[in-house]
Amino acid sequence: MAALTLDPKFRVVPAPRKAFDLPAIDAAEAASATGAILSGVASGQITPGEATEVAKLVETFVKAFETGD
C-alpha cells in the first residue's frame, strides 16, 4: 500500500511518485513500450490505472505515426 501524507489543509493525499521512464519509441517499438509499462506496474512504479493511461498514449502515438506514413 502506498504511503500517505497529510497536506496543510488536513487532506490525505498520496505520497509523490518517482518518475517513470518510458523509452523513446517509434511505431515498430510499441511492443517494447508496452513491456516497459507492464514492468512499471509489476515493480510498483505506476498503478494499473496509470499504466492504462500511458498505454492509451502509446496507442494514440502509433495510430498517428501510421496515419502519417
Image (cartoon, helix red, strand yellow):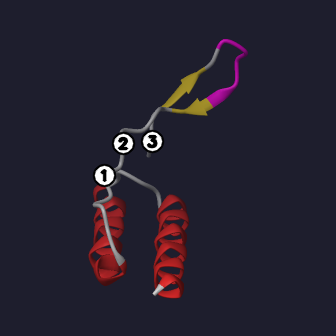
Mark 3, residue position: 2
- Give the residue drawn at x 70%, y 25%: 11
| Pointer 1 local density, CA inside 10 Å: few below 14, some 14–19, many at least 20 | few
| Residue 68 in the image: above or below residue 21 | below
Going by the numbered disc 1, the residue's amino acid type is Asp
Mark 1, residue position: 21
- Mark 1 or mark 3, whichever is nearer to me: 1
- Mark 3 or mark 2, whichever is nearer to me: 2
Going by the numbered disc 3, the residue's amino acid type is Ala
- Give the residue drawn at x 30%, y 61%: 24
**Can you tell which mark lies on residue 33?**
none
- The secondary element bearing badge 1 is classed as loop
- The secondary element bearing badge 3 is classed as loop
Q: CA distance from mark 1 to mark 3?
A: 19 Å
First along the sequence among labels 3 and 2: 3
Please say whether residue 58 is one of the residues in the magenta stretch. Answer: no
| Residue 4 in the image: above or below residue 1 | above
Pick whichever, 14 or 23, lies toward us: 23
Going by the numbered disc 2, the residue's amino acid type is Ala
Do labels 1 and 3 touch, CB within 8 Å?
no
Residue 2 horizontal/vertical position (percent) = 45, 41
Left or right of 25: which side holds 49? right
Q: CA distance from mark 1 to mark 2?
A: 6 Å
Residue 48 horizontal/vertical position (percent) = 48, 64
Do labels 1 and 2 touch, CB within 8 Å?
yes
Residue 8 sits in which quadrant? top right
Mark 2, residue position: 19
Instruction: Give the magenta range.
Output: 8-12
